[in-house]
Image: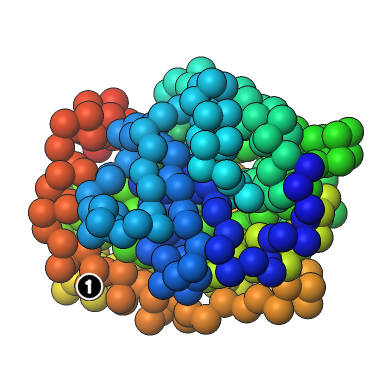
Amino acid sequence: MREAARVGTEMDMRVLVTGGCGFIGTNVVRRWRSERPDWTLVNLDKLTYAANPENLADLERDPKYIFVRGDVGNEELVSHVLESRKIDAVVHMAAESHVDRSILGPGIFIESNVRGTQVLLDACKRAKVSRFVMVSTDEVYGSLGPTGLFTESTPLAPSSPYSASKAAADLIALAYHHTFEMDVVVTRCSNNYGAFQFPEKFIPLMITNAMRDESLPVYGDGGNVRDWIHVDDHATGILAALEKGKAGETYNFGGSSERRNIDVAKQILAQLKKPETLLKFVQDRAGHDRRYAIDASKAKRDLGWSPAHDFENGLAETVRWYVGHPEWIEKTRSGEYRNYYDKQYGARLA
Ligand code: NAD
Ligand code: TDX
């Protein structure tokens, strides 16, 4: 293991981010390039349906940004990247990330999220990487009743194949700390929103459907609650965990912005000046978690982190971003998206 002290103190850190062409990855890479200009960022991404390398096209000529196309489960490739690029730290974000897709087909979630994470961890162990940040999720805790918050000691009780695969990866990463003394830090964040989010997820789906005067499919009674956080605040949280987190610890991040889905959908319609008749209550998601809410006091106290964005302003800014990027929407909603949309919503919206 290289000295853990190297992380957070060196000007010229070389960080491997996985899944950098996805929603959170794009925002992380863009933000960290400007906040840590001396770091080299190597982005390993398989480019699944959810990836959009054009999000980072303007970094192509940046000598401190390197893109490598590949699977985190490809042992040979991962080891080669770690050694040849002399990687100091790894921030692991690559994953299959959509709950509904994990209900339609769990296999790839186990392959990428569980096996992929284990292969990556093994390669990092061999290469003596100084720090491994596992980007996990609050969904590993399962569902809350009407009161209470998830803390880092809430027992894990994932409900969906997606969250179960993330819980497995999260625990395997911690096991590599306990068993092999690897320097691992785990982050568990609540629902992110912001620019570049693939329109299968709730907020961009509601925005892009409303923009086209299409129905907004609200699952169940619309009373499920999510604790929304701006993606930029998650990006600063992961950075703080990388630089200041303690090995073997987990840190929750959340925006203290609990909202019912139906209220978020109505807010989006109001901003776009579209009628509420577009709302359509549809068959619920199987095993749908009722409520998520995060206690982020540990990250605030130990990492000096706090969210900078307020939900109402952040949502308004996000709606404006989508309105300003019709070509991006067109591209992401074409091809494979149509097949998925028909499978997921065809019967629900018929
Ligand atoms: P995303 O689906 O937008 O992006 C995932 C990226 O990972 C894509 O670019 C994809 O090509 C890549 N990828 C998938 N499988 C891969 C593999 N086997 N090898 C290499 N690359 C692969 O997801 P996101 O919303 O940006 O989420 C990123 C991470 O953050 C995930 O680990 C997710 O579980 C976690 N997370 C997300 C949220 C959220 O609200 N979106 C909240 C908490 C945690
Ligand atoms: O069409 C929809 N209608 C609807 O009512 C969709 C896609 C979602 N919903 C509801 C389900 C949830 O209660 O909206 C809420 C948010 O749904 P998603 O955007 O699918 O997010 P969620 O299932 O909460 O998971 C997200 O947060 C945690 C991310 O997708 C995960 O990657 C992250 O780990």
Q: Label 1 is placed on what type of residue? A: Arg
* Residue most extreme to the top: 107
Q: Is residue 3 left or right of residue 318?
A: right
Residue 213 appears in the picture as rendered: no
Quadrant of residue 158 within the rendered picture: top right
Residue 297 point in image, percent of width and height = 75, 73
Badge 1: residue crowd in 10 Å (few <14, some 14–19, many ≥20): some
Q: Quadrant of the N terminus?
A: top right
Look at 54% across and 21% down and name the residue there. 76
Q: Which quarter shows the C terminus?
A: top left
Q: Residue at x 15, y 37 (%)?
A: 334
For disc 1, the marked residue is 320
Instruction: Name the spot of residue 118 as percent of width and height, x first.
Output: 66, 27
Which of the pair 265/183 is nearer the observer? 183
For the residue pair 154 and 86, the one nearer the viewer reads as 86
Q: In this rendering, would 33 be left or right of 123?
A: left
| Residue 5 x %, y % | 78, 61
Q: Residue at x 69, y 43 (%)?
A: 129
Q: Is residue 19 above or below residue 148?
A: above
Secondary structure beneath dot 1 equals: helix
The image quadrant of residue 179 is: top right
Rendering coords of residue 308 (x, y %): 52, 81
In the rendered image of this protein, does residue 50 appear above or below residue 111? below
Residue at horizontal 15 percent and vertical 44 percent from the top: 331
Displayed quadrant of residue 56: bottom left
Question: Can residue 175 be seen by looking at this rendering?
Answer: yes
